Structure formats: structure tokens, C-alpha cells
Amino acid sequence: MQKDVVALKKITDPRGNLVVLEEGRDIPFAVKRCYYIYGVREDAPRGFHAHKTLQQLLICVAGGCDILLDDGAAKTTLRLDDPAAAVYVGPLVWHEMRNFTADCVLLALASAVYDESDYIRDYEDFLQRVKA
Ligand code: TYD
């Protein structure tokens, strides 16, 4: 399981910063969908699921949140609060997001269009699938 926040390519000049993500270079899959989460209440955790096949790259383009990653064997919590940093979430990784700052905009780049049948929303079901 990828457990670290990955630094993205940042181009800085006196005007400010530009971050670039290119498919096949910085994104290890073809991007079929992007979505973003914002205006999340600080006491409202999100996620609480894993995916059967979906790959995602998560970036807080503003603000920050904690991301718990659980591969069924080990749990890691990462703080994502830098627009030039990303977390990769592969298949069969249970993830939970908490402690969103009021200004947080969490961008997700995903390898497939939305498909509810790819979700594993029950933690016991997740553990069974990891074992199988
Ligand atoms: P949900 O999976 O509960 O969000 P989170 O993982 O942040 O807790 O999704 C919230 C709602 O949005 C749910 O009804 C499914 C819907 N949704 C889409 O229609 N398309 C999408 O790409 C996503 C991610 C969610």
C-alpha cells in the first residue's frame, strides 16, 4: 500500500506556483473522472469505503484534511494540506477523511467513471475481500 504523501511537480516563480499533473507521468492511470469535495463540516467525516478496482489520486487544492488508509493489515493516517502534494488510493484500500478545514477543497482524479457497484461500503465485507 502506498503510505506516503507524494510531492507533485511545482513550478515556482516570482508570480507564484503552478502544479502540473500529467497522465502516465505523475498520474499512474488514465483519468476518466474528477470530482471535488468542499464545504465539509469539520465534524463530518467522509469516505468509509474501499473500491474493488478504482484508482484515485487525492489532492487538497486548498485547505487540508486527514486521510486514513487501511489495507486490512495496517492503518496509516496522513495529513494532506499542500496543493503540491497527493495521496494515491488504489483498489482494496479502505479510506476515511476527517478534520476538514473550512476552506478545504479535496480534488479526486479517478481511473473510472462513477460506478456504485465498485464500492465496498461494509468494513467486514472489505476485510473478507482482502483475505480472499
Ligand atoms: P459518497 O461516496 O458518500 O462520498 P464520500 O466518499 O465523500 O463520503 O458520495 C456522496 C454521493 O455522491 C453519493 O450519493 C454518490 C454520489 N457520487 C456521484 O454521483 N458521483 C461520484 O463521482 C461520486 C464520488 C459520488
Image (cartoon, rainbow, N blue to C red):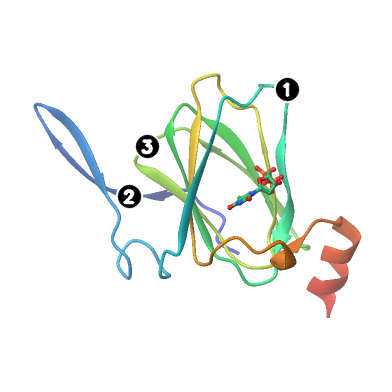
Is the shortest distance between ligand 1 and the CB of mark 2 under 8 Å? Answer: no
**Amino acid bearing label 1:** Asp
In this figure, which residue is indicated by the disc labeled 3? Answer: 83
Residue 73 placement (x, y as % from top left): 77, 63
Q: Helix, strand, or loop for circle 3?
A: loop
Residue 24 placement (x, y as % from top left): 32, 71
The answer to which of marks 2 and 3 sits earlier in the sequence is 2
Q: At x 53% / y 67%, what residue is drawn?
A: 112
Residue that sits furthest to the top in the current view: 102
101 relative to 112, above or below? above
The answer to which of marks 3 and 1 sits earlier in the sequence is 1
Q: Gap in Å between the C-alphas at discs 1 and 2?
A: 29 Å
In this figure, which residue is indicated by the disc labeled 1? Answer: 43
Q: Helix, strand, or loop for circle 2?
A: loop
Q: Gap in Å between the C-alphas at discs 3 and 1?
A: 22 Å
Q: Are marks 2 and 3 in contact (CB under 8 Å)?
A: no
The answer to which of marks 1 and 2 sits earlier in the sequence is 2
Image depth: mark 1 or mark 2 in front: 1
Q: Quadrant of the N terminus?
A: bottom right
27 relative to 98, above or below? below
